[in-house]
Amino acid sequence: MPGRRATLLQGTLDLLILKALSAGALHGLGVSRRIEQTTGGTFAVQPGSLFPALHRLEEAGWLTSDWQPSENNRRAKYYTLTKAGRRQLGEEAAQWNQIALAIARALEA
Amino acid sequence: MKRLVSLWRNLVHRNRVDRDLDEELRAAFELLVDEKVRRGMQPDDARRAARLELGNLESLKSQVRDARAGAGVDTLVQDIRYSLRLFRRAPGFTAVAVVTLALGIGANAAIFGVVKSVLLDALPYADADRLVRVYGRLLDGSAERGPLSAGTIHAIAERQRSFESLAAFDSARDGVLGGDDFARIVRIAWVEPGLFKTLGVSAALGRTFHQDDRASGLVPLSGGQLGPDTARVVLLTHAAWQRLFAGDPDVVGRDVSINGIPRTVVGVLPRDFVGPMGQADFYFAFDLGPVLANPVTVRRSQWLGVVGRLKPGTTHEAAQGEIAAVWADLAREYPEDNGNLGVSAMPLHDAMVGDTRTPLLVLMASAALVLLIACANLAAALFSRSLSRRKEFAVRVALGAGRRRLVRQLLTESTVLAVAGGASGLLLAQSVLSLLRGLARPVLPAYAELSLDPGALLVTAVLAFSTGLAFGVVPALSVDRVDAQGTLRDQARGASEGRRPRRLRGLLVAGQMALCASLLAGAGLLARSLWEMATAPLGFDPAGVLTATVRLPPRDYPTPETRARFHEQLAERLRLLAGVDAVAIASKVPTVDPSRASFAIEGAPPNAAQPFVVFASVSDDYFRTLRIPLRQGRTFDASDRTGAPPSAVISASMARRYWPPGEALGSRIRIGPDANSPLVTVVGIVGDVRNDPARPDAEPMAYRSNRQIPTSRVCVLLRTHGDPLALARLVERGLAVLDPSLPIQQVMTLRAAVGEGLAARRLPVMLMTAFSALALLLASVGVYGMFASMAAAREREFGVRLALGSPPRAIAGLMLLQGARWMALGLVGGALGIVLVAKLLRSLLAGLPTFDPIALGGAVAVLLGCATVALLIPLRRATRVDPVAVLRAE
């Protein structure tokens, strides 16, 4: 069932975005670069998935955004984790660890 | 809510959101280009590469837009779709839940609609809580809310200080509207002109009465004619304006003929106005002066109602105290007139609610019990469903579904159920109310507008919702807390239903049985008492008797002789009809609000208080026609003509009550208040008649011959063989030949008239029986559900037991033991409920012991019977578990 797979992947992306923003505000490209950096290049998030995801998370109330000057002295839209987003990060991380553990155990068995 | 706001923003401020997105993507593009340039790319190549990396900007933008809108709506739609799919997969559960909710909500909303309109809504008068009704009563208890004499009202009005104003009124009487070719019976209420000011009602069109509209022409009960009918101006009620004048906007000033006398309409009353005497078509203004001036009618004719408006700041208690004090003086001053009477004052609202209060509260309580039982069922169904879905939840948690998401899914499910149940409940309530509008109209106060009450709907809906939420979501939360692995493993091993959920279910079933037992007991008691009333002998035989009523207008029949001639000619004509065995004429049909008259036995001290008895004037054949047995002496015959010595026939209970044994026959009495009226000889004693079929005992009664007292109200009673109603046309034609201007009214069988007397009693019985049937059904579903889930949970265990050689009987015993505990608990609770219900209903159970063993035993037997049937099905299934199949499923 493709739906289940998509959900799983979407959940992963959300988790990665939330984690990337947990250290501080970033603009869209910054989020993408941070994920690349922290996962050692395993995940390269394409803008086609990144921007819809950012907006979806903002709509869900986990992120807020504002316009700030960027490093190249232009204006860029910066995303910040909200309190709800931080809580969500904790929950998703815990769940992810649980599943990862379960699957690891299952593979060892 | 937040979601709706952002959805709104996305839809309405689409341009702004889009511009924002454009800028964001342009900034990202520039950042990307800068990044690539920094890595050493040529600016042009960098631009090309960045454009490639971002892809099609339009499709990216539309993806973002979808994501934004979808984040809110998508999941909701998804949840709803998922809920609907689940409900389709479990149609039994869904149907039970929705129907249960619909019944609970529907019954409550409908009954509350009635209760609110009768008990809670304000009367259609200004500052209605300052209005007081004063009643007269007979100290022997035979009449509690009776009329007062003009003298008493006048004295109260003069001596009191609590009221701004007081106004008297008569009960509505029949009159004839129109001329020879267009005659209609209308209801006329004579009132004091100040009544409308006292009630705080002004006319919708024209004006209400002035003091100089007062007229004479009223005939008080058992008094003489007090001058000619001089009423020339009349008021019209809104309903009569619509019905009789088609809402003619120029009706004010129009001339109408009522009782053959021309009069002018001076005003139309507002649409919602109902007089304290009940429905009427016309209002006439009377002058009590002549009544007060006449020594006979002033205090001895009790025929008036009275309402007063309290001064601001005066309490009802103070007014009641004052009226009691005034009455104490009046009783002392006129012991011969007032000695047997008392007065009571009560808020007008209580007076108009009348006897409907207790039945309505009982019904409201019943509907609430049904709702509780329904909620218990819903709770049990949702709860066991949540438990059986533990595995599904565990799988979804394992696949990454957040707890929030699960709870939201469950919330959506409960909401979808509640909305479906609530909507069907609303429809049900609507149809129940329109049914009640037809059924209950005659027994409810005239002002009651039966309508659905939004408040009641809200309360019941909230109750149903919270039940759904509490029992649908809470178990899911607790399941969610359990780790997914454990649940999945646990489920695979096939554990039995846990202890805690089982206890909860048991408690729910016990509660249902207790509530159901109380309801059934109530319905049983009410039904038994109605049965007693309907089957107890009336003292006359209503079967096969047709009744019809006409009223002789005073203009055409001014003298007793003309009326007596009409009575005689009518009886003669009707006697000739084929199929008629006997014809009688009477001033009243028995069972329809009887007239009462005071009487005195010859030789009684002149100042002694006079007792009241039911009084009727009847033709010779009356007793034969109604098959009322003669006990002693004779009934009326041709010798009781006008001018002959006045004669009376009395009932056995009157003879028993007021004379020493054997002395009534031949003694002489005065009937009516006038001490100078001729003495009447008791020539016969007849059997007792229960005029009010809702009363177990027969009231004492006196009859006089219609030759000597020819009344203007003429009730015809025909004993027929065959269908009485088949003669209705012939009776009408016979009347038309005698006097074509007389409109005939109330053609019905005597049995129907008796039934009308019981209508007020029948409605609560019907409704409460319906409620208990509902409760029984719901409780049976509850019992079934408990045993079914018990059987399902222990299926494997039973399979193993059977495989190991346990007899099916033992399995059944195991299950019964487990379930019977809760049913026994339910019956214990039910016993408490039954005691409460029986006490509450005591005032409605005429002639029945409070704890009638037949009704109560029947209720418990019916409940146990249904519960047994409900538990047999899962029991059978449990004992027929196929061990092989069960164990292979492991």
Image (cartoon, coloured by chain):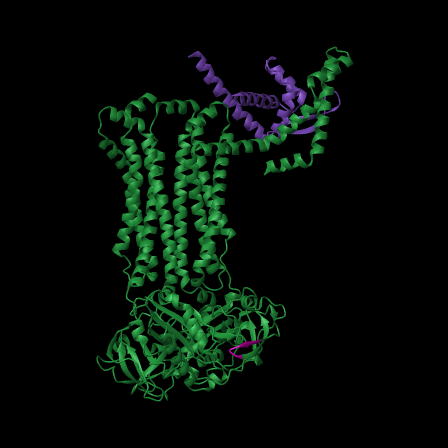
**Residue B30, relative to residue B312: is it above or below?**
above
Residue B51 as seen in the image, left or right of residue B487? right
Which part of the image, by quadrant, shows the C terminus of chain B?
A: top left
**Residue B772, relative to residue B221: is it above or below?**
above
Residue closer to the observer: A9 or B321: A9
Query: Does the segment drawn in magenta span residue B288?
Result: no
Q: Is residue B890 visible?
A: no
**Residue B731, relative to residue B492: is it above or below?**
below
- In x, y percent, where is residue B336? 36, 83
Q: Main secondary structure of the magenta part?
A: strand
Residue B798: which quarter of the image? top left
Residue B194 as seen in the image, left or right of residue B629? right
Residue closer to the observer: B749 or B459: B749
Number of numbered tags placed on the structure image: 0
Residue B142: which quarter of the image? bottom left
- In x, y percent, where is residue B50? 72, 16
Q: Which chain is purple?
A: A
Query: Does the segment drawn in magenta span residue B258?
Result: yes
Q: Residue furthest top?
A: B40
Q: Is residue B38 visible?
A: yes
- In x, y percent, where is residue B756? 39, 64
Residue shown at the point (49%, 75%) measured from the top left = B175
Q: Tell me which segment is drawn in magenta.
A: B256-260
Residue closer to the observer: A54 or B706: B706
- In x, y percent, where is residue B470? 44, 39
Residue shown at the point (39%, 58%) measured from the top left = B763
Residue B386: which quarter of the image? top left
Which part of the image, by quadrant, shows the N terminus of chain B?
A: top right
Chain B painted colour: green
Residue closer to the observer: B802 or B254: B254
